[in-house]
Image (cartoon, rainbow, N blue to C red):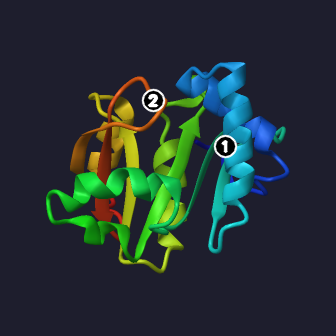
Amino acid sequence: MDDVAVGPLDLAARVDDALAVQALAFGLSDDEIAVRRHIVLRHFGCPGARALGATTPAGRLIGFVYGMPNDRTHWWSTVVEPYLRSQGIDHWLDDSFTITELHVHPAYQGRGIGRSLITRITDEATQPRSILSAIDVESPARALYRSLGYRDIARRVLFPSAPTPYAVMGAPLPLKRH
């Protein structure tokens, strides 16, 4: 990570750069990118929303994370709430910091950039816990989250328009360090 700097990111100004990273990391189509662009810009009107970026010495954005204090009225919370409520754990939606997106360019994955992004953004959170969702398959991302203290709190969560189920994961803050 010596050649990558992690710091505050003006996501509204660099939304297209961030979505280019997300498209590569997540395999998004142009139509999906257009929808997500609108969502990202809307999120940055929410109180407490913030972002960090990982950049090369030349200023190329190669990773980013953004999140915000969770709000039960937001779309994501309304989708996951029934899954958590059915287990009696919907309190995870209260007083938590949501990791909305975390993506690292595939050529830079496995170098600790994702770990640095997520730990730095949650270190700044005032909430006692963090929540996120990830595709419900074993993956390097899920392994990273587990190593930081996240655990599955709901599985097989179905989001409208998503072709695969997700897992909702939660962790107490601060995250574990190795």
Which-is-in-front pick, marks 1 and 2?
2
Label 2 Cα crowd, 10 Å radius (few <14 / some 14-19 / many 20+):
few
Mark 2 secondary-structure assignment: loop
Q: Which residue is mark 2?
A: 162
Estimate the x, y position of residue 6 in percent, counting from the top left: 65, 53
Say left or right for 165 vs 120. left
Q: Which residue is mark 1?
A: 4
Outermost left residue: 87
Estimate the x, y position of residue 74 in percent, counting from the top left: 52, 61
Q: Residue at x 30, y 67 (%)?
A: 92
Q: Residue at x 48, y 70 (%)?
A: 123
CA distance for labels 1 and 2: 32 Å
Question: Is residue 148 in sight in this rendering?
Answer: no
Say left or right for 47 vs 166. right
Reply above or below: 73 against 153. Answer: below
Mark 1 secondary-structure assignment: loop
Q: Amino acid at mark 1?
A: Val
Label 1 Cα crowd, 10 Å radius (few <14 / some 14-19 / many 20+):
many
Q: Quadrant of residue 103?
A: top right
Estimate the x, y position of residue 107 in percent, counting from the top left: 59, 23
Contact between marks 1 and 2 (CB within 8 A): the answer is: no
Q: Residue at x 42, y 57 (%)?
A: 78
